């Protein structure tokens, strides 16, 4: 388990992380989302022990991580611009990883390199950006650590490669104890792989909740009223987060459990009514607005 308490980090006058409290349970895929400059990379770098906090604590399985090789050997961080030694090839990097991560899976690494068509002896400096990302992900997975921290790592991959890499993660999640924390702007992608979402804004935590619980509390529905005058009454009874119309078709995003929301429409004559699945983006907007943020003003890719 990762426990973060009253964490602060400043770069000169810039407060990158402000009084952050967060607990990350084990065996989860924790999606870290937030606006540009929200502090995601800074947080991941502190979690991985690269950066020191100004104040506050980070405990990983009860141990501080900064300057603690034992705690660090339990986690692997894949940065958005992965670092490789000058002149290194995949095998030299793997041998280096073996010295840091005692459970590094060398045979698996060699098999995966072959599967993904990466030459074990070619200089990494000659790899494309996407190939470097692939290699970083394979090294990270084969490090076989309990915690894996990923900073926008899927972003430079083509769609087929993204899918293959995500399948590898899914396999590892099934096969062994693995807690993944993944920062990304791609909410659709996070929705596929995460079971918990933490939303950072201006260095603080806006919300941290299981995706399934979020989905229980927010509904999206579409309807066409027989009598458009019924709209006002329905709007009054619902906790409406978003309402759009296209012709006579109304689309609502509303807070509340599905049965409560459906009950509001029970006695209203309608020609069409349907409850639709919600996207993470819609949930994110609703949750953020519930705590006072106008997310339409926040920039998300
Ligand atoms: N090395 C640095 N020196 C000075 N300021 C920095 C440094 N790294 C980050 N910052 C500042 O700290 C804040 C948080 O940056 P960080 O990179 O953690 O955000 P982020 O959420 O990862 O952003 P993005 O989504 O754009 O990658 C920003 O205001 C940024 O300008």
Image (tube, rainbow, N blue to C red):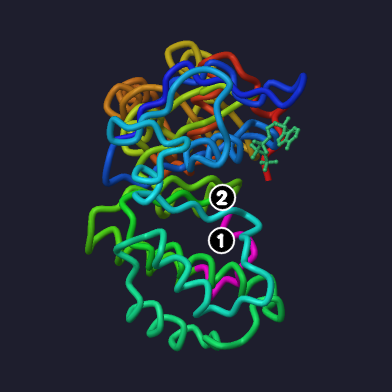
Residue at screen point 33% across, 55% down: 145
| 2 lies left or right of 136 | left
Q: Nearer the viewer, residue 211 or 274?
A: 211
Front residue (pair 159, 108): 108
Residue 31 at x, y percent in the picture: 46, 43
| Residue visible at 54% across and 85% down in the picture | 118
Above or below, 120 relative to 272? below
What label sits on residue 154 in the rendered view? 1
- Residue contact between numbered discs 1 and 2, judged by CB atoms under 8 Å: no
Q: Check mark 2 vs ligand 1: CB closer than 8 Å? yes or no.
A: yes
Crowding around mark 1 (Cα neighbors within 10 Å: few <14, some 14 to 19, many 20+) is many
What range of the chain is rendered magenta?
A: 151-162
Label number found at residue 151: 2
Residue sitting at 42 percent across and 54 percent down? 192
Residue 147 percent location from the top left of the image: 36, 49
User: Circle 1 — which element?
Assistant: loop
Secondary element under disc 2, as helix, strand or loop, is strand
């Amino acid at each position: 388990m990762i426990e973060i308490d009253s964490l602060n980090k400043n770069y000169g006058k810039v407060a990158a992380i402000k009084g952050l409290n967060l607990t990350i349970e084990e065996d989860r895929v924790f999606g870290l989302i937030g606006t540009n400059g929200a502090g995601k990379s800074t947080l991941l770098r502190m979690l991985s022990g690269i950066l020191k906090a100004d104040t506050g604590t980070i405990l990983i399985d009860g141990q501080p991580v900064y300057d603690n090789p034992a705690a660090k050997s339990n986690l692997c961080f894949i940065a958005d611009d992965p670092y490789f030694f000058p002149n290194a090839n995949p095998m030299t990097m793997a041998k280096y990883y073996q010295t840091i991560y005692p459970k590094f899976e060398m045979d698996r690494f060699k098999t995966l390199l072959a599967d993904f068509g990466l030459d074990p002896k070619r200089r990494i400096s000659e790899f494309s950006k996407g190939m470097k990302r692939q290699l970083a992900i394979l090294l990270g997975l084969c490090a076989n650590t309990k915690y894996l921290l990923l900073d926008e790592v899927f972003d430079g991959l083509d769609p087929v490669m993204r899918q293959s890499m995500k399948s590898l993660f899914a396999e590892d999640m099934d096969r062994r104890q693995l807690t993944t924390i993944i920062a990304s702007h791609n909410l659709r992608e996070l929705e596929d792989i995460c079971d918990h979402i933490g939303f950072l804004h201006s260095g603080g935590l806006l919300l941290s909740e299981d995706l399934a619980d979020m989905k229980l509390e927010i509904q999206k529905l579409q309807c066409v009223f027989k009598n458009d005058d019924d709209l006002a009454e329905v709007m009054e009874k619902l906790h409406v987060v978003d309402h759009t119309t296209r012709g006579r078709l109304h689309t609502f995003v509303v807070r509340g459990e599905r049965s409560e929301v459906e009950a509001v429409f029970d006695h209203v004559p309608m020609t069409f009514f349907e409850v639709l699945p919600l996207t993470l983006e819609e949930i994110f907007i609703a949750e953020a607005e519930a705590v006072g943020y106008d997310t339409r003003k926040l920039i998300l890719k």
